[in-house]
Image (cartoon, rainbow, N blue to C red):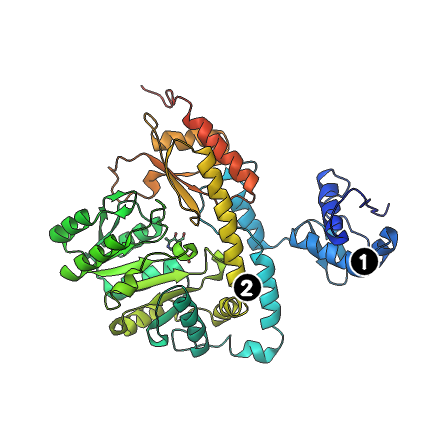
Amino acid sequence: MTIWNPNLEGYPGPRYKALADAIADDIKTGVLKPKQKLPTHRSLAELLGVTVGTVTRGYAEAEKRELIVARMGSGTFVGGKSNGMSDYLKSLRDHGNQIDMSLSITLSHGQEQVLADILNEIGTSADSIQGLIGYQYEAGSIRHRSVFVDWLRRIGIKADQDNLVICNGGQNAINTILSALTRSGDRVVSDMLTYPGFTYLARHHRLRHFGVEMDQFGLITEDLEDICQKHQPRILYCMPNLQNPSSTTLPEQRRREVMEIAKRYDMYVIEDQVQGVFQQNPPLSLYELDQERVFFSCSFSKIFAGGLRIGLIVTPSRFLKPVESALYLDSLFAPPLMAEVACNAIESGRLDKLIKEKKAEIGARQQLVDTLFDGLDYINQPECPHTWLNLPDPWQADEFVLELQKKGVLVKAVNSFAVNPTNNTQGIRICLTSPHTREQVEKGLTLIRDTIDQHPGVWQSIM
Ligand SMILES: Cc1ncc(COP(=O)(O)O)c(C=O)c1O
């Protein structure tokens, strides 16, 4: 067996990065084969005339990029970790050669390493783990609630420890609130195009679900009032910041109108900010406008990792007990170990850093939208993980999605989000965060643009 002996001369930058780059190139060209064992740190250092520390850093960098894997006691091998979750996420992101822009998932941007570091820190002793693995009776420990309250205050939500409930992610937050507040047959209202997870929950709870007309700023308050008059809904579910799927942000004046209507018709409001946490200086939250009527919910899924399953509910004080009970009946409580991970990310400043970096990358991807979609009818914002594109006549959203699929680009059509099946807008949601690289985003957007400029033709049998 020949020993791998890369030539680092052609690679610029620090030697450890050059080593990781050489590994990447040699895997690409087949010089390094899957599962091949790499030289030990010491022998490669001698071959390359660098320090052992440089090789260690280079291997660590390559491992971070999931090119190689180190196995304690047996050595370092080509090929990423066969770690169920990351393989699963990869398969979600890259269906073979397809560019998947259909999934609202967080950017892959170093959170794996952040998580690995945090888990190392948390797991330093059995004592430190002990308090994180037992049953608990409150909706979050005092320590965790206090860290989350401080963080929420930093993003403009004046929560208190005694009206905060830690739950199992944003979906669980909505389910918990619906369980606490509604009974079968109640009516609920949301934007006409909404997060499908809410629509499914409304069906599951046997609620009658109405959709409010929208424009480029979000829900139209006159239509909301009309629905309230006719149907007296118990709850309005909405996403005032970076709405999913339309990318709209409700202006402050409309937020005030929404809360006046809610008061007039004695309706409660779920303000879902799972997508909106990225937004810089958003208008006043609905929760701040009426803390007696608004349930605020958010999670760490879009800013950190979807698998963390930690969400937060800020509830009007008088609903604390019903909300806690609904969570308790469903899942007892959210895992304290995961809450500790989120708190550590907040306290160590790592979450802020991740958010800052992800925001910058999302901004760069949205700039591509502005360049490539020039002249089209679309809604985007610099911090929004997705873009909404209204299709020009005569394109129908379904046929457009099929046509794109043939070209290897996946997006979601309006029907996935429409409350009312007879809706007649023709649009698609394009997620900019699911592809791994900016290049893939550019390629996907270019194919979308090219497809728009093409005539749809006849797309199915007319017999
Ligand atoms: C608006 C909205 N709310 C809630 C969720 C669910 O979030 P989580 O993964 O934290 O359960 C999503 C996920 O896409 C979402 O888009």
Q: Residues within 10 Å of mark 2 (few under 14, many from 20)?
A: some
In the rendered view, does 176 fall on the left or right side of 236?
right
Q: Secondary structure at mark 1?
A: helix
Q: Position of residue 52 (x, y in %)?
A: 81, 60
Residue 242 vertical position relative to residue 448 in the rendered view, above or below? below
Q: Depth check: 255 or 136 in front?
A: 255
Residue 139 vertical position relative to residue 58 in the rendered view, above or below? below
Q: Depth check: 259 or 59 in front?
A: 259
Amino acid bearing label 1: His
Residue 41 circle label: 1
Q: Is residue 1 visible?
A: no
Ligand 1: does it lie within 8 Å of the C-beta at label 2? Answer: no
Q: Secondary structure at mark 2?
A: helix
Residue 180 vertical position relative to residue 188 in the rendered view, above or below? below
Q: Depth check: 372 or 145 in front?
A: 372
Amino acid bearing label 2: Arg
Q: Residue at x 53, y 58 (%)?
A: 354
Q: Ligand 1: which quarter?
A: bottom left
Q: Position of residue 265 (x, y in %)?
A: 14, 59
Q: Residues within 10 Å of mark 1 (few under 14, many from 20)?
A: some
Q: Position of residue 302 (x, y in %)?
A: 45, 55
Which corner quadrant of the image does residue 179 belong to? bottom left
In the rendered view, does 66 fall on the left or right side of 54?
left
Q: Residue at x 83, y 59 (%)?
A: 51
Residue 350 circle label: 2
Which corner quadrant of the image does residue 151 belong to? bottom left
Quadrant assignment for the C terminus:
top left
Residue 67 vertical position relative to residue 272 in the rendered view, above or below? above
Q: Position of residue 404 (x, y in %)?
A: 45, 31
Residue 431 circle label: none
Q: For the residues marked 2 and 1, what is the alpha-carbon distance in whole angstroms?
A: 30 Å
In the rendered view, does 35 fall on the left or right side of 158?
right
